[in-house]
Amino acid sequence: MKQKTYNQVTCTIFIIITLMHVHRLVLGWNANIAGWEVPMWFSAVAVVAGSFLAWSAFKLEK
């Protein structure tokens, strides 16, 4: 796989994950992992981290 293709795929994956966390925050969805309820602040951190990683992959593509 070429580096440009890898960066595009990585950017797309991080954008999708970030958008799902944004939807969770906006719509108030609950998330449970093995009986543990994931706090909403976790999604806020994931939005920031996912946005940074998507931006970094996009920037590397250039």
Image (cartoon, rainbow, N blue to C red):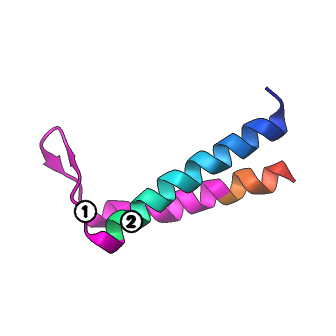
- The residue that appears at 82% across and 35% down in the rendered structure is 3
How many discs appear? 2
Mark 2, other Cα within 10 Å: few <14 / some 14–19 / many ≥20: few
Q: Which residues are magenta?
A: 26-54
Q: Which secondary structure lies at badge 1?
A: loop
Quarter of the image for residue 24 reads bottom left
Magenta segment includes 42? yes
Image coordinates for residue 19, horizontal then vertical, percent: 48, 61
Any part of residue 44 in sight? no
Single out the residue that lies furthest toward the left.
Answer: 35
Task: Give the crowd class for mark 1: few <14, some 14-19, many >=20 residues within 10 Å.
Answer: few
Would you say the residues marked 1 and 2 are in contact, meaning their CB atoms lie under 8 Å apart? yes
Residue 56 placement: quadrant = bottom right
Which kind of residue does numbered mark 2 sit on?
His
Marks 1 and 2, how far apart at CA: 8 Å
Camera-nearest residue between 42 and 23:
23
In which quadrant is the C terminus drawn? bottom right
Asked which quadrant contains residue 34, the reply is: top left
Q: Residue at x 64, y 55 (%)?
A: 54
Q: Which mark is residue 2?
A: none
Residue that badge 1 annotates: 29
- Label number found at residue 23: 2
